[in-house]
Image (cartoon, grey):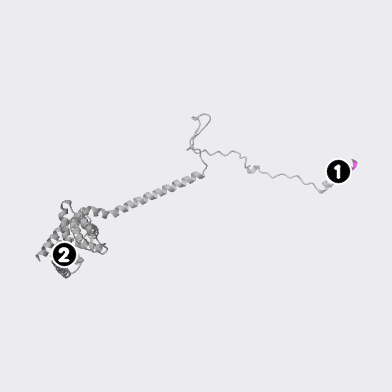
């Protein structure tokens, strides 16, 4: 029995010499709070991703619009006279041409008129004209 | 750990919870080491016990001592880990046991840890639990029963069988 007691005592000494390597409180309390932090980080990440997608879509749509619309000269166009007098910036939109006062391509409604036809001669007039022609030939 | 700290920890006071974990980290680690025989596994089991302890702390009713209840959590974790345990390499075991303690006491402690393993490693799991809690953690029969979640009579019988087995083991060594 004494030997068993001795064995148990030395085993207990070994048992008590064991220590947890580290600070469990610091390790675990950080881990317990981690899910809440992940929720925050996840939310921020989702918002950032949504913003990035919005910007991408916006940029793509504006690029498509630019490619379909008539191209604008990138370089500034300078006039022959002098650059100070007349310079078009690449950013400037070309001014819309004003409509002419009287359009030539499409005549106004009032200007449209029906073509005039010659009057058709009557049967008697034609016969008379024919008989006169034959008398002229006979006389010749 | 006093009652005020315990109540504060139950309410979610992080300082109090940290104090509780500091008081429990070594007993948990020793118990898990004794049950699992591996410092690495014991460390994992200690961390898992702490996590479960913190989650269950607000529901602690105070029917038993906090330490006894905490030991019960560690026993459950160790049982679960044993069920899914791989065969442990003896050399890796010794190395991890030596790494888990301070270098100045390493030589002495590795001998003592070897002695601990030699003493209890041949015992069946239930007997190991009973001996560790009763003789090494100084829990009463009642507290050991609470931690092991069994009747006091079962604890007495298990300890009796364990001591008989240890005696037999020593006799064979001579």
Disc 1: CA contacts within 10 A as few (<14), some (14-19) or many (>=20):
few
Disc 2 from disc 1: Cα separation? 153 Å
Is label 2 or label 1 in front?
Answer: 2
**In the picture shown, does residue A107 fall above or below B76?**
above
Viewer-side residue, B113 vs A55 = B113
Q: Position of residue B142 (x, y in %)?
A: 15, 66
Q: Which residue sits furthest right?
A: A139
Give the chain letter at badge 2: B
Report which quarter residue B41 is drawn in.
bottom left
Q: In this view, does A128 lie to the left or right of B20?
A: right
Report which quarter residue B101 is drawn in.
bottom left
Return the residue at label 2.
Answer: B131
Return the residue at label 1.
Answer: A133
Bounds of the magenta segment: A133-139
Q: Is residue A47 magenta?
A: no
Q: In this view, does A140 lie to the left or right of B115?
A: right
Q: Is residue A134 magenta?
A: yes
Mark 2, secondary structure of its residue: helix
Q: Position of residue B82 (x, y in %)?
A: 24, 63
Viewer-side residue, A82 vs B74 = B74
Q: Where is residue B36 in the image (x, y as percent from the top left)?
A: 22, 61
- Main SS type for the magenta part? helix
Q: Position of residue B132 (x, y in %)?
A: 17, 63
Disc 2: CA contacts within 10 A as few (<14), some (14-19) or many (>=20):
many
Q: Which residue sits furthest left?
A: A2
Give the chain letter at badge 1: A
Q: Is residue A45 left or right of residue B146?
A: right
Quarter of the image with the C terminus of chain A in it: top right
User: In the image, what residue occupies the spot 16% across and 54% down?
Assistant: B107
Quarter of the image with the N terminus of chain A in it: bottom left
């Amino acid at each position: 029995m004494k030997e068993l007691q001795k064995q148990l005592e030395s085993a207990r000494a070994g048992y008590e010499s064991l220590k947890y390597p580290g600070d469990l409180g610091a390790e675990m309390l950080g881990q317990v709070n981690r899910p809440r932090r992940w929720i925050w980080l996840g939310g921020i990440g989702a918002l950032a991703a949504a913003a990035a997608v919005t910007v991408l879509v916006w940029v793509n749509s504006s690029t498509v619009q630019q490619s379909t619309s008539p191209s604008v000269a990138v370089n500034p166009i300078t006039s022959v006279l002098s650059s100070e007098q007349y310079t078009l910036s690449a950013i400037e939109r070309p001014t819309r041409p004003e409509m002419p006062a009287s359009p030539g391509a499409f005549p106004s409604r009032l200007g449209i008129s029906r073509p005039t036809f010659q009057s058709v001669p009557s049967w008697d007039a034609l016969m008379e004209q024919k008989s006169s022609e034959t008398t002229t030939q006979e006389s010749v | 750990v006093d009652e005020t700290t315990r109540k504060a920890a139950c309410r979610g006071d992080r300082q109090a919870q940290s104090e509780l974990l500091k008081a429990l980290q070594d007993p948990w680690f020793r118990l898990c080491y004794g049950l699992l025989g591996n410092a690495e596994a014991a460390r994992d089991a200690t961390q898992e016990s702490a996590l479960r302890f913190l989650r269950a702390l607000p529901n602690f009713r105070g029917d038993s001592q906090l330490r006894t209840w905490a030991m019960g959590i560690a026993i459950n974790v160790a049982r679960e880990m044993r069920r899914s345990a791989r065969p442990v390499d003896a050399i890796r075991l010794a190395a991890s046991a030596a790494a888990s303690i301070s270098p100045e006491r390493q030589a002495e402690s590795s001998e003592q840890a070897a002695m601990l393993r030699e003493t209890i490693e041949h015992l069946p799991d239930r007997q190991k639990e009973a001996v560790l809690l009763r003789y090494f953690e100084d829990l009463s029969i009642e507290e050991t029963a609470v931690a092991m979640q069994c009747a006091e009579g079962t604890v007495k019988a298990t300890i009796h069988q364990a001591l008989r087995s240890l005696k037999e083991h020593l006799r064979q060594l001579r």
